Image (cartoon, grey):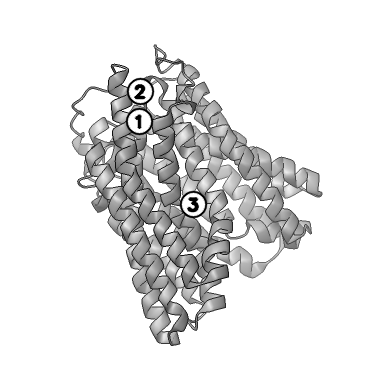
């Protein structure tokens, strides 16, 4: 599948010495700047989005939930076509316009006055943003040296967590004000940050509006959607990505409805996650620079996720202090799993992709994660929340099977590539 040379180029020193949110290397510094702006904007809007539509626009909570689910489906479908377009016409140009479109769709939220208008704006926003994520990931493959790519992604994830954390704090101020004016200013600011990020994309090195790949892989540029070994790896990575829904949706519901822990424990776990991921993500990439390292990391991630599920399950019968302590333990274990699975996922996502169709491959891989994000709330609810400890055991088993399955799937993908002579 991969058409890259067998030996990866050594990482450029500027790309690997991360001295802060904005490192010295010019490419990574520019990527960090646009990532920080984008993440800050998303952090602003994330905590207020549903409340804006329910409290200000006046839509029902169920209607908003259904609408966002429908929009999510359009987002999943948008990834591969956007990747295909970026393979043909260039990543920078396409990502610039996609992010400008995201800003426009977001700004449209401020004039939404009916459910059809909300649905149209939500679909446009989800499709454009999800398409942009796949193109952005393919752009990383273009502008970061192969040897520095995974560590670079780790650094950018650290920047993302920091930006979303600070943005979320400002979003909380808008929640406290709870006024239409406050929500509107916040939404328009996020829209403006999308446009600012898009303009920074134009300053990245590499192609402009030209094709980024001169030859098509065997089977055509759409081969990624028929590449069964790659789809298997994508699916297993998506199963591991269900952990994000567990943390964001399942754990707060579990804490409030099934444990004696203080209600603020849910916020504590989220803050702890953001801080710890920022601290350990770059370190977690060490030893995950090749496919064997990625397989080991994802296998360990599955086992660690199972341990965190077990810790969360036990909190149901403990005192408030005991439940809080075990929630923190489970959250720390989950952070380690998250850092390992992210590093492993980046490595297999890039390492198994055909470099001549990197856009489509990253679009498919990213759509798998988007599907996991959409399915996670329902899955966590019907397992852990509805059935308690038995449900947590089901989730733990799912994570273990996915982690153990990555190795055979990667070997299948490599045999398939050898059979085709790649």
Nearer-N-terminus badge (3/2):
3
Compared across the picture, whether 279 is left or right of 64 comes to: left
Q: Which residue has dot 1 on it?
A: 141
User: Can residue 197 be seen here?
Assistant: no
Question: Residue at the spot x=30%, y=20% of the render?
Answer: 419
Mark 2: which secondary structure?
helix
Q: Is residue 367 left or right of residue 23?
A: right
Give the left or right position of residue 293, taking residue 69 as reference: left
| Mark 2, residue position | 355
Position of residue 123 measured from the top left corner of the image (x, y, whole percent): 67, 40
Q: Are marks 1 and 2 in contact (CB under 8 Å)?
A: yes
Q: From the viewer's perspective, is residue 108 above or below residue 388?
A: above
Q: Earlier in the sequence, mark 1 or mark 3?
A: 3
Locate residue 294: give its quadrant: top left
Tell me, for residue 228, which label it has, or none.
none
- Across and down, in percent, residue 195 comes to 55, 38
Q: Residue at label 3? A: 40
The first of marks 1 and 2 along the sequence is 1
Q: Nearer the viewer, residue 313 or 66?
A: 313
Q: Is residue 47 above or below residue 296?
A: below
Q: Residue furthest right?
A: 114
Q: In x, y percent, where is residue 84? A: 50, 23
> Mark 1, mark 2: which one is toward the viewer?
2
Q: Position of residue 368 (x, y in %)?
A: 49, 41
């Amino acid at each position: 599948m991969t058409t890259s040379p067998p030996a990866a180029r050594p990482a450029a020193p500027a790309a690997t010495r991360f001295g802060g949110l904005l490192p010295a290397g010019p490419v990574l510094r520019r990527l960090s700047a646009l990532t920080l702006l984008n993440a800050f904007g998303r952090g602003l809007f994330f905590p207020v989005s549903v409340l804006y539509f329910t409290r200000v626009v006046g839509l029902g909570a169920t209607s908003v939930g259904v609408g966002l689910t429908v929009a999510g489906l359009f987002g999943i479908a948008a990834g591969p076509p956007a990747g295909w377009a970026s393979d043909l016409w260039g990543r920078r140009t396409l990502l610039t316009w996609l992010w400008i479109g995201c800003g426009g769709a977001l700004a449209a939220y401020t004039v939404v006055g009916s459910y059809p208008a909300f649905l149209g704006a939500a679909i446009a926003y989800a499709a454009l943003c999800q398409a942009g994520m796949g193109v952005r990931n393919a752009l990383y493959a273009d502008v970061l040296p192969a040897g520095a790519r995974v560590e670079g992604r780790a650094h950018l994830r650290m920047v993302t967590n920091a930006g979303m954390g600070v943005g979320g704090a400002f979003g909380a101020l808008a929640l406290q004000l709870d006024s239409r004016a406050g929500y509107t200013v916040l939404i328009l600011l996020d829209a403006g940050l999308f446009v600012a990020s898009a303009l920074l994309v134009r300053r990245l090195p590499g192609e402009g509006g030209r094709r980024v790949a001169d030859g098509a892989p065997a089977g055509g540029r759409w081969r990624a959607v028929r590449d069964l070994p790659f789809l298997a790896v994508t699916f297993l990575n998506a199963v591991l990505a269900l952990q994000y829904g567990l943390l964001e949706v399942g754990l707060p519901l579990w804490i409030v409805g099934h444990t004696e822990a203080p209600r603020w424990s849910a916020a504590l776990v989220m803050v702890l996650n953001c801080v710890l991921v920022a601290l350990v993500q770059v370190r977690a990439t060490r030893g995950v620079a090749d496919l064997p390292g990625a397989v080991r990391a994802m296998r360990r991630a599955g086992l660690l996720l199972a341990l965190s599920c077990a810790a969360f399950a036990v909190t149901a019968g403990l005192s408030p202090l005991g439940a809080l302590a075990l929630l923190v333990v489970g959250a720390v274990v989950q952070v380690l799993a998250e850092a390992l699975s992210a590093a492993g996922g980046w490595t297999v996502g890039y390492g198994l992709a055909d470099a001549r169709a990197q856009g489509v491959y990253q679009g498919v891989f990213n759509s798998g994660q988007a599907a996991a994000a959409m399915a996670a709330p329902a899955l966590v609810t019907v397992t852990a929340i509805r059935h308690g400890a038995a449900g947590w055991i089901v989730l733990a088993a799912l994570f273990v099977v996915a982690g153990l399955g990555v190795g055979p799937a990667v070997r299948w993908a490599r045999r398939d590539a050898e059979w085709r002579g790649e």
